[in-house]
């Protein structure tokens, strides 16, 4: 049994043109929706990567600020000892 043997009886029943058009429009709509969903997902993935990079930079800055604060505390302590 070939594909034409299966499809031919369906076509012989004379599908209404409106039904065929509805199927085509639904298919086109589903493909359009899937494409736009894929684009939204790609955009979210790009922004997530950018946020991870920003978080890494913030962590480095926090570490540097902690080191600077420790140095500043030592300097202030030395200045306080000199003044007394």
Image (cartoon, rainbow, N blue to C red):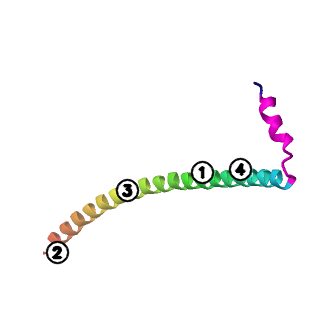
Q: Is residue 64 left or right of residue 82?
A: right
Q: Main secondary structure of the magenta part?
A: helix
Element class at badge 2: helix
State which mark lies toward you, 4 or 2: 4
State which mark lies toward you, 1 or 4: 4
Question: Which labelled disc corresponds to residue 53?
Answer: none
**Vertical order, 4 against 64 (above or below):** above
C-alpha span from label 4 to label 2: 77 Å
Q: Nearer the viewer, residue 21 or 51?
A: 21
C-alpha span from label 2 to label 3: 36 Å
**Disc 4 packing (10 Å; few <14; some 14–19; many ≥20):** few
**x%, y% of residue 16?**
85, 52
Range covered by the magenta-colored residues: 3-17
Q: Nearer the viewer, residue 44 or 5?
A: 5
> Which residue is under mark 3?
59
> Which residue is under mark 4?
31
> Which residue is under mark 1?
42
Element class at badge 4: helix
Question: Which labelled disc corresponds to residue 83?
Answer: 2
State which mark lies toward you, 2 or 3: 3
**x%, y% of residue 58?**
41, 58
- Which mark is first along the chain, 4 or 3? 4
C-alpha span from label 1 to label 4: 17 Å
């Amino acid at each position: 049994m070939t594909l034409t043997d299966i499809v031919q009886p369906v076509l012989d029943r004379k599908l209404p043109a409106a039904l065929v058009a509805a199927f085509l429009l639904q298919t086109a709509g589903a493909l359009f929706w899937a494409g736009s969903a894929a684009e939204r997902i790609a955009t979210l993935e790009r922004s997530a990567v950018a946020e991870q990079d920003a978080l890494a930079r913030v962590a480095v800055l926090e570490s540097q600020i902690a080191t600077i604060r420790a140095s500043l505390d030592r300097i202030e302590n030395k200045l306080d000892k000199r003044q007394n």
